[in-house]
Structures are given as C-alpha cells and as structure tokens.
Image (cartoon, coloured by chain):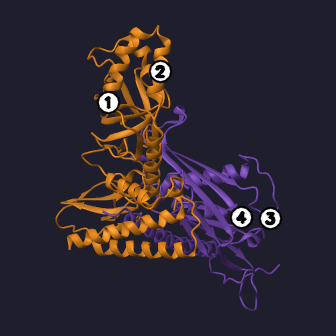
Amino acid sequence: MEYVNPLTGFRLDGRRPNEMRQIRGEIGVVAKADGSALFEMGNTKVIAAVYGPREVQNKGQQINNRALVRCEYSMANFSTGDRRRRPKGDRRSTEISLVIRQTMEACILTHLLPHSQIDIFVQVLQADGGTRSACINAATLALADAGIPMRDIVTSCSAGYLCSTPLLDLNYIEDSAGGPDVTVGMLAKMDKVTLLQMDAKLPMDIFENVMQLAIEGCKAVAHYIREVLLEHTKQLECHRGA
Amino acid sequence: MRDLQLSLNQTQRVRLQVALQQLQDLASQAAASSSVTIADTIPVNNEDGILKGHGTSELDGQVVATLCGVVERVNKLVYVRALRARYKPEVGDIIVGRVIEIAFKRWRLEINFSQDAVLMLSSMNLPDGIQRRRTAVDELNMRSIFEENDVICAEVRGFQHDGSLHLQARSQKYGKLERGQLLTVPAYLVKRRKQHFHHLEQYGVDLILGCNGFVWVGEHLKTGEHDMLDDQERRPEISKSNKIDDEEQEWTFTPLEVRHHICRIANAVRLLSALGFILTVEAIIDTTEAGFSSNIEIKDMLGPEFYVQIVEREVQRRISLLRKKG
C-alpha cells in the first residue's frame, strides 16, 4: 500500500510528511481533580486527571524523601472502531502506564513533596494512533494545572518511516502498517530526551533523521502547550483580581 | 468554567464575553502582572544578588520557574506564587478540615494539603474547659469529642521535624462545626487576613473562610455557651429523658429562614469560586445581596442569568475601584 503519494508527496490524510495533525489542549475539564486536561492530536483524544500531592494511601509504599508517582492508563470502550470491553491491567495498558509514569517522574520535582503521592489518570477517548504521545502531553498539562513543581515541560511526539520517507505524527492507518514507530518524549527547554521507544529495526542514519523529525514535533507541541498554560494562568490571575 | 455547567442563551453569551473582555482589559490596566509558565526564564538582575524562593530553580545560570503562576519580588527574594495548587500551610492559619481517622492520642484531618494534618488530644481544650493532664480515660473518650467525618475548625500550630503538620484548637472559637455546609474552593481564592471568622448578623449565619480553601457556612452559635451548658446541665438530667429530648430538639433545630440564608450564602460562594473571583466577606455578602435585590430563587443563583449578572457586577466594582485610586 502506498502511504505517501509518489506524485504529490502527500500522505493518506492529505498531510505532508513533516506535518503534524492539528493539536488542541484544554485545561480544567474534571471538576473534582486537582488538575485536569484534555489533549487532542487530530482524531486522537485523551483526557488526563491528576490527584495530589495527597496523603499516601498505602502506607507501605510511602517514600520518606520524595513523592510517590502513580499512573493509570486506560482506553475507553468506545475509543476504537470496534466497541469492545477492555479488561483493566492488560499487558499493553500496564506497559503504557509504566512508560508515562517514568516520563512524568523524571520531570516532577518529587523531592519537594515528601511523604505524599501523586496520581495521574489518563484515558483515551478516541484512538487514532499516537495515543502514547497524546497521553504524555495531556498528563503534562494536567500536572501543570495541579500546581505540581516540574523541571520542565515534557512533550512527546511520534515519527515513523514508510515508503522510504520519514513521517511525523503517525495516525492509525500508518501506525498499523507495521513500519517502525519512534516515540520520543523530551524536556523541551533543557533539550533532554526522557523517552525513546521503537519496536522495529532501522538503519542508524535513517533512525537519526526520523528521531530528529520526532524531536521537531516535540518542540512544536511544547510551544503550543506553553501558550495554553500561559493563557490559562493569565486568565486565572485576571479573574482573581487584587 | 470548572464547577458549573451552564447553558447560556445567545444574549447571555454575548454579555458574558463582553464582561470577561472588560475584566481582562482592567487587569492589564491595573498592573502588568508577570505570569510565567513552567520553565520560563524569570528576568533578574544578577549584579545585586538574588534569593530564589518557591517555584524557582536554576538552569544554566538563569532563574527558571517550576510552576505556573505569578512572579513576586520582595527586595532580593524572587518567587513564583502558584495559582491552582494545593494549600501551603503557614503557622497561625485558620483552617477547616474533616476528621478522617482517630489514632493514638490524635485525630487525622484532611485539609487539602499534601499530607494529612494531625490534631493532638493534648493540643486542644477539653469540653469541660479545665486545664489538666490528659488521662487514659480522655483518650478512650476521644470519639465523644470528634468522630470520623466531623468538620472541625482549628489553627496551624507548626511543622514537626519530619514534615508533618500539627494543629491546635485551644480556644472556644475552634472545634466542631455543626448545622451548616462545607464548601471546597481552590485555596488561592482565600486570602490570609486578620479575620477569618465572620458572623453575618443580618442573616444569623457564621461564615468561616479557612485558609486551606474549605469554607464553612453554618448557623450562628454563641461561642462557648453551648458546650458549657451542655455538659453541666445535662448530666443531672439524664434520668429525665423527655426533657432531654426537648432540649435535643431545640439544639438540632434550625429555623427555615436561617436554612435559606445558609443555602444562599453557600451558593454565592460556589458561584464566586466557579468564576475564580477572590473570596472575601464583602464579595460574598455583595453577591448574596444581589441575589436578594433581584429576587432570584436560591436554586437560580447557580443559573446562567445570575452568573452573567455577577460577572457584570464585578466589572462595575473593579471600574469604580480603579476610579477611586486614579
């Protein structure tokens, strides 16, 4: 199957190879959570809620000099084309929970919040490829909304390699083509990679190009997320008044 | 808005937009407050040394924010004041909390902090009002003072060396709160002031604005009277059960009018917190009065019309404030 039109160079959904899908972020979507956010990348839609820092629920897990970060990833029954019941804690969701937890833990200043626990819940409302990235971006927004101190903003974006072209931000069709899918998560300002996943083989030189593309994507996402956050902060401050 | 789901009609939407725009214009007029987001560089003058406060860290020799909020500068100190975050306790704060656990000689309270607060049996006045050592009997009777899920008002006593927070309730004004409503609002909407206990005489209602963002609206109690009378008078009368019933009923009875007032004030608080306006007694009374003067029913105080009205009212208030200043 041709994922990139050889004549025009456009992809199946009409994007250029180095073009991202439209992104949208919204803060404050869950009333009772300490922080919450909705993040969309094209048709992928993810909701994240952060509770905490709060008292550790399971005293055995308490860490004395830093906060305990927990993360739970789930997919809504209606998120994919075929509606099906998804058991909690299957291999895929445990793995993604772990990935998100590690990525977020790397940027949260956990040593400032000893004896406490931070819970991150992310749920995929609509899946169209790149749920991993969307979840990380949503979690970042939600954590920032909850007022949890962080080193930097973590953003994530995926890139792939199909029809001998590096493609940015794969959607479901491109994702299921079976080509390599590189997910990069990075601290935008510090220029540090905190997450790198690829489940296929790629030659070194091509991999570098693909990864560079994903990094560019991360930076674009970071730029947008900062705008959303700044806007939100300004609005809160302006409403609060003197 | 976070807490209220409103369906505005066309005119209301336009009015709301205009009012919100005005609010924004006013805010930019009043002061160029410098909002920052995570990892934004905070411009500082490196020559005359600075002190990095909360919400800042250093990266490549620059001061960088670690929170979303507003940069505040006090002499050399630079810090970021976070909006929407959990409560940060300071010694002497008056807080409202809920008992979640009774442990050895202490109650644990949920107070919207990153840990549970501790109220020791020894750091509160016993109901009989006598100063003495706490005995084992007192320890066994802790549930007669506060039970699980009781709402309590107390003061922050200090931090223990392990970082846990201790409270005290050594005055008649602190203690169990009954016959009213507890509202939770974001902690940044309550400013620290001299007075956090308010008796709204015109409504017969007590209002406690806890620094931790827990707001109590309840029937007015004459401080101290109830607890004292209760203990002294009841004990000899235990045999006369019907008399106690009468008294009990009188104690648990709240007049309908006061209940209405409580609900009105509670709705005013809900509305203001949903709008993100700062919660002061003046603002709450003003909102409640606005509800009275426009003859709005209690349930409609959370409706779209009153919502837009309050935003417009706030705009007017801020404009007049600016005029007074300038």
The answer to whether dots 1 and 2 both sit on one chain is yes
**Closer to the N terminus: mark 3 or mark 4?**
3
Q: Disc 1, disc 2: CB below 8 Å? A: no
Q: Mark 3, chain letter?
A: A
User: Which amino acid, by three-letter code, is at mark 3?
Assistant: Gly
CA distance for labels 3 and 2: 65 Å
Quadrant assignment, res B30: bottom left
- Check disc 4 and give the amino acid type: Ala
Q: What residue sits right under mark 3 in the picture?
A: A81
Identity of the amino acid at label 2?
A: Asp
Q: In the image, which disc is placed on residue B246?
A: 2
Q: Which mark is residue A127?
A: 4
Q: Are marks 3 and 4 in contact (CB under 8 Å)?
A: no
Image point (40%, 61%), residue name: B68
Q: Is residue A127 visible?
A: yes
Label 1: chain letter: B
Whole-angstrom CA distance, mark 3 to mark 4, is 9 Å
Q: Disc 4 or disc 2, which is closer to the eye?
A: 2
Describe the element under mark 4 as helix, strand or loop: loop
| Chain identifier matching the purple colour in the rendered picture | A
